[in-house]
Image: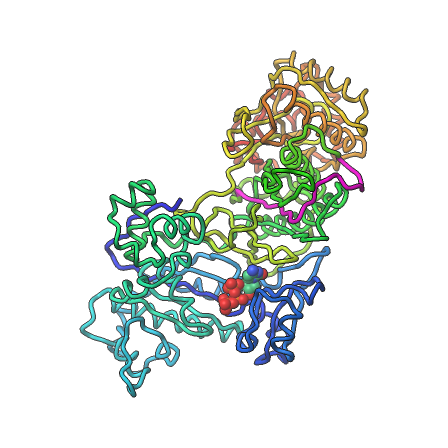
Amino acid sequence: MPVARHESADARIIAHVDMDCFYVQVEQRRQPELRGLPTAVVQYNEWKGGALIAVGYEARNFGVNRHMRGHEAKEACPQINLVQVPVARGKADLSTYRNAGSEVVSILSRKGRCERASIDEVYLDLTDAAKAMLAETPPESLELVDEEALKSHILGLKNENGSDTKANVREWLCRSDADHREKLLACGALIVAELRMQVLKETEFTCSAGVAHNKMLAKLASALNKPAQQTVVPFSSVKGLLELLPVKKMKQLGGKLGTSLQNELGVNAVGDLLNFSEDKLQELYGVNTGTWLWNTARGISGEEVQARLLPKSHGSGKSFPGPRALKTVDSVKHWLNQLCEELNERLCSDLEQNKRIARTLTLHASAFKSSSSDSFKKFPSKSCPLRYGAVKMQEDAFNLFQAGLREYLGSCVVRTQGTHYNGWGITAISISASKIMPILSGTCSIMKYFHGQDKYVSSSKQDEINFIQDAPLSPSGSENYSELNSTEPPIEFSAEEATIRDSVSGFNQQEVKTNTRKEQNSSCATLNEAADSFTRETSPSLSSGTASCSVLNRSKPPREVHWDDSLDKSVIVNLKQQEQKRNASKDKGKSSILNFFKSRNTPCSPCTQKHNETIQNAKASSSAGGCGAELNQVELPKESFFKESTTNIEQIRQRREAWNYRIEDIDLSVIDELPPEIQNEIRAWVRPNKRPKPGSIITHYFLPSKNS
Ligand code: DCP
């Protein structure tokens, strides 16, 4: 639910800048011969000409809109140029658009705090720049006002018949008797006009903007006059702006809350909310939301512009509508592999360029069951700590998928491979990497070192700062991708392909966290610990009756194991024995630097892979075995090197060789900058005669499980 924020009494000058028909402009820049011609960008899928995802304004004049497919667009506008989204790995490749968005951001961020809100949207806090302008060159002192600024739409400014609009705007901008806030707003309008011109000059892209005293109003205003225009919202026109604005158009009110206002209170326009006292709204919707609604009705919003040029998450998704639904395990695996490759590449770029690592991998999917009364059941999202490297990510993503599928099917056992139909279908799937954070300067070189060792790490580099953004798929597919409702911007799917509009959530403060299923687990890939390494976390939104444990649960009673035809029973027996043995052991290092190193460098052997598949089936059975009901979390197979007291130097040496690390390659100078407990462990590893303490947390330091 939205959260009310106090709006400072000091006037702020906030702009929302939104690119016009962005993908079309990018394509027109690439193919200048398309400029001025009706053009639309379509998904690469050829069915009925592909789904339109961006429509140029010339084409809109012919009635073409984004809900059409290429064929319909051709009917409406026979001369339309349909440009296909670039494709890579069998899916849309948005990097050109992301990079183009980054070009724009780098220009807009020159004048004030800048928050990239999506692939083509930015919020700017221009308060300081406006104050500086007012102090140094107040608009009233200007002899010549920029032409672009004169084209501004000033909400509430009356244009008498026959009067010169530009002259009116000029007068408004340059009023010497205006109050301080309005003077600042005029400065904001001048600054934004200048920025927009600069964007056009440097990138050839046009954009539209809203200039107001807060984000909410600026965002509303930017959409009022498009393309290539700007709209200013003086205080005095806020009431008029909101009075007739349909509630559903208001940020945060597009979903259930808006529907409730309509159905239960008869509130259809934002202005209708003025009829309700704050007390009443609080009584109905709770203190926070009630106050937020009360404020919203008055155009009050204290939400800050976050200084954020980089994405909060990366994601990669694809939809498989209708007959293209994925119905076999192998087909899901295939696509997960593609998505993981892409995600890994982008994460590696982010690491390389921005020194950031992502810590959580999440899988979302939309699915159907062919024979089920609860066919509307949602496929549960699943998360685990993120491991860099395409192969590891692929393993983890597949395990997440299986865990989700088990829960979705309410079945203990699901097939881990196969090309036959199982009675379910996947209509959209995405993976995302979140909890992205900068790595400490000291860990930078060590991370790069790991990074360089991974043969799957992309070598691709980009010259400029890469503001790649991405978005996990909204499991329901119902949310839009603007920053309204989720911490992690969802991908909205158009009819065929994951839609793909990137967005950075800009709504930290008022957002509703939709993906509550954050899970943690271990992340290594060998057999030994797999059978007992289940993690759980409170997740009320998941299946009922789920036990909640938020830490590694290693002392669970032995589970019953169920298997299907694909399971090798002797392996299961073996697993059970190992599990019992481990349960007897108290000395269980949860992870280790060695573990960490290994997980980053040793792709799963076919044997391990097979075991993992088996384990997944075995894990599934635990839900029926009374060890905590259904799995909400996925713990990936894990290996602990230090759990046995008999671990000796020779073993360590051998393993080290197996990992292909040479101690001398490690930059020891970085160790001092690591947390002390991790330092100890690395030192113990570097000098193996000093045995590391069990229960090391190195993995936890680098991977999400630490703070999850
Ligand atoms: N996009 C997408 N799928 C969607 C919506 C948008 O892939 N369902 C992409 C294509 C758009 C870009 O995101 O060009 C920006 O989306 P906007 O909603 O801002 O729309 P446009 O920029 O295309 O047009 P407008 O000028 O109306 O903002």
Where is residue 312? Give x, y as percent: 51, 49
| Colouring convention used in this rendered image of the protein | rainbow
Instruction: List the single residue furthest toward the front.
Output: 373
Q: Is residue 464 visible?
A: no
- Span highlighted in magenta in the image: 416-435
Residue nearest the observer in this picture, 400 or 182: 400
Where is residue 226? Give x, y as percent: 45, 72
Decide: is 284 above or below 36.
Answer: above
Residue at horizontal 64 percent and vertical 63 percent from the top: 51
Split into 4 quadrants, where in the image is the N terminus? top left
Q: Is residue 481 visible?
A: yes
Say left or right for 1 vs 666: left
Indicate whether residue 448 is drawn in magenta. Answer: no
Ligand 1 is found in the corner quadrant, namely: bottom right
Where is residue 136? Give x, y as percent: 27, 70
Decide: is 310 above or below 687.
Answer: below
Decide: is 558 above or below 488.
Answer: above
Where is residue 402? Give x, y as percent: 68, 36
Instruction: List the single residue furthest toward the left.
Output: 177
Instruction: List the single residue furthest toward the bottom.
Output: 162
Residue at horizontal 33 percent and vertical 68 percent from the top: 188
